[in-house]
Amino acid sequence: MIHSITHLSPSNETTPCPYCSQHTSVELPATYRPVYAYCGACGKKFIAERLAEGFHTLTLEAAPCFSDPDCRELEMAGTDEE
């Protein structure tokens, strides 16, 4: 069985801000790791996350912990076994 591997590369995308709907630029990493983005119009921080097809944006208030880069880092760091 042959599996196709998709190689991602960093990309710059334009998306409506989830707070004010103004178009803003988002830099997505070459991984599925969520990142913070900042709206140039309203100045608010929001989350951008790659999906299997495309990406989506989330407000900080609506994002689950696993989609929030800071919360995700804390949760994953807490799973280390000694």
Image (spheres, grey):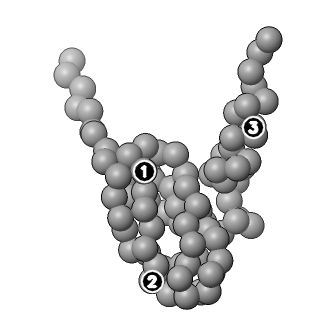
Q: Nearer the viewer, mark 2 or mark 1?
A: 1
**Type of amino acid at the residue the image marks with label 3:** Glu
Residue found at x 66% / y 53%: 68
Q: Where does the image place residue 17, in percent across and percent down from the top left?
A: 54, 78
Question: Residue drawn at (58%, 61%), measured in percent from left and top?
Answer: 36
Disc 3 from disc 2: Cα separation:
31 Å
Q: Residues within 10 Å of mark 1 (few under 14, many from 20)?
A: some
| 1 sits to left or right of 67 | left
| Horizontal and vertical percent position of residue 70 | 70, 50
Q: Is residue 19 above or below residue 5?
A: below
Q: Position of residue 21 (x, y in %)?
A: 53, 85
Name the side, left or right, on which 24 lies relative to 36: left
Checking the image for residue 23, the label placed there is: 2
Q: Which type of secondary structure does the marked residue at label 2 adopt? A: strand
Checking the image for residue 29, the label placed there is 1
**Which residue in the rendered view is the most extreme toward the top?**
82
Look at the picture and state if 62 lies above or below 3: below
Indicate the quadrant where residue 78 lies. top right
- Residues under numbered marks 3 and 2 in contact, where contact means CB atoms less than 8 Å apart: no
Image-quadrant location for residue 46: bottom right
As helix, strand or loop, the secondary structure at mark 1 comes to loop
Frontmost of labels 3 and 1 is 1
Q: Which residue is mark 3?
A: 75
Kind of residue at badge 2? His
Res 21 seen here: no
Bin the neighbour count of mark 2 within 10 Å (Cα to Cα): few under 14, some 14-19, many 20 and up.
some
Q: Amino acid at mark 1?
A: Pro
Give the residue at x 43% y 73%.
Answer: 25
Residue 51 at x, y = what percent?
Answer: 44, 52
Mark 3 Cα shell of 10 Å, populated few (<14), some (14-19), many (≥20): few
Kindly report the distance in space between the C-alpha atoms of the residues bearing marks 2 and 1.
19 Å
- At 27% across and 39% down in the image, what residue appears? 6
